[in-house]
Amino acid sequence: MLKIDGLKKKYGQSMALDGLSMQVDDGSLYGFVGPNGAGKTTTIKIITGLLLPDRGTVTIDGIDVTREPASVREKIGYVPDFFGIYDNVKVSEYMEFFASCYGLYGLKARRRCMMLLEQVRLDEKADFFVEGLSRGMKQRLSLARALIHNPALLIMDEPTAGLDPRTRLEFRQILKDLREQKKTILISSHILPELSEICTDIGIVDQGRVVLEGTMTDILNQINISSSLIISTKGNQDKAIEILRSHPSVQTIAIEQEDIVVGFTGDRQDEATLLKRLVDEGVRVYGFVREKGSLESVFMEITNHKEERLVLVHEG
Ligand code: ATP
């Protein structure tokens, strides 16, 4: 669906994108995540044709966004990270105005708008003024607007920023519905957990490059495989260490009182074999667990800007 190759963009002397490449497959919900200033908004602006890259290509279904911006725009629905000011406009009027921008008028427009308002759970607010809506409602209205021309690819920039947990939950449900309608969705955020729960794919961006990309399943498997084994023994720790030293999947060994923390690259089968060997050779093992790796810990490690730039917990 979306393919980005070697994107570069400078603002003056400051490098915003430094060879960013990524791929979003048909029907996926892709979490585009990275710390503040990583280059997410710049990338989205280029995809949506609002900004030209210095180098690199972006194609949607094989169509180049810089060469054929009009064709590409038909395929994209864009939900920006801000909501423009619309005074004295009712929700239905707001929707119908945007419908008219796509050549939809009269009954056809009204039907389409009402259907979309139902989809984002705003049908009961059709006669309310936009300015009186809550932040979460405005966000959903923005989403309904982005869907007017039935785009195949939906791009959302920080869609849940500033929303309370309940509103976020509603938003997630709407995203699930959209996936059932086979939409491909790209969501950018600097808050990882809320994406890791709903996304099928993740791309982590840092300093203008995608530094890790893959399906959630593959990434989580990798994390689990690279996490430590914690073996608790009673008494004969030396024997346990001797066995561990000779094991090919053991990379590091650290002693923490009665626990041995082992950098272990093996899979579950290797874990079982190791445990059996320890027990067979008389080591009294009373604890044997693989530390649960988390996407957050990987994010922290690879972006490595722990102090002020990452937000790894739900806000609000
Ligand atoms: P955030 O999560 O804070 O929105 P982001 O990942 O979306 O961040 P961008 O907004 O794309 O990051 O910014 C990437 C880099 O480019 C940052 O260093 C930013 O300061 C810089 N930048 C962005 N827009 C401009 C601009 N109009 N002029 C100059 N520098 C800019």
Image (cartoon, rainbow, N blue to C red):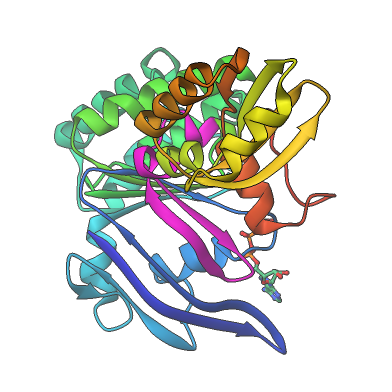
- In this rendering, the answer to whether 177 lies above or below 293 is above
Task: From the top left corner, tell me how far across and down residue 240 is, in percent.
Answer: 63, 29
Magenta-colored stretch includes residue 201: yes
Is 60 on the left or on the right of 225, as rendered?
left
Q: Which residues are magenta?
A: 194-219
Residue depicted at 69% across the width and 37% down the height:
312
Is 276 on the left or on the right of 160, as rendered?
left
Magenta-colored stretch includes residue 300: no
Task: From the top left corner, tell me how far across and down residue 44 is, in percent.
Answer: 47, 62
Quadrant of image for the C terminus: top right
Residue depicted at 79% across the width and 50% down the height:
306
Residue depicted at 61% across the width and 23% down the height:
134
Task: From the top left corner, tell me how far across and down residue 54 is, in percent.
Answer: 49, 88
Kindly indicate the quadrant of the structure image that contains residue 303. bottom right
In this orientation, which residue lies closer to the viewer: 198 or 45? 198
Q: Quadrant of ligand 1?
A: bottom right
Kindly indicate the quadrant of the structure image that contains residue 115. top left
- In this rendering, the answer to whether 64 lies above or below 226 is below
In this orientation, which residue lies closer to the viewer: 139 or 95? 139
Residue depicted at 56% across the width and 19% down the height:
167
Kindly indicate the quadrant of the structure image that contains residue 315. top right
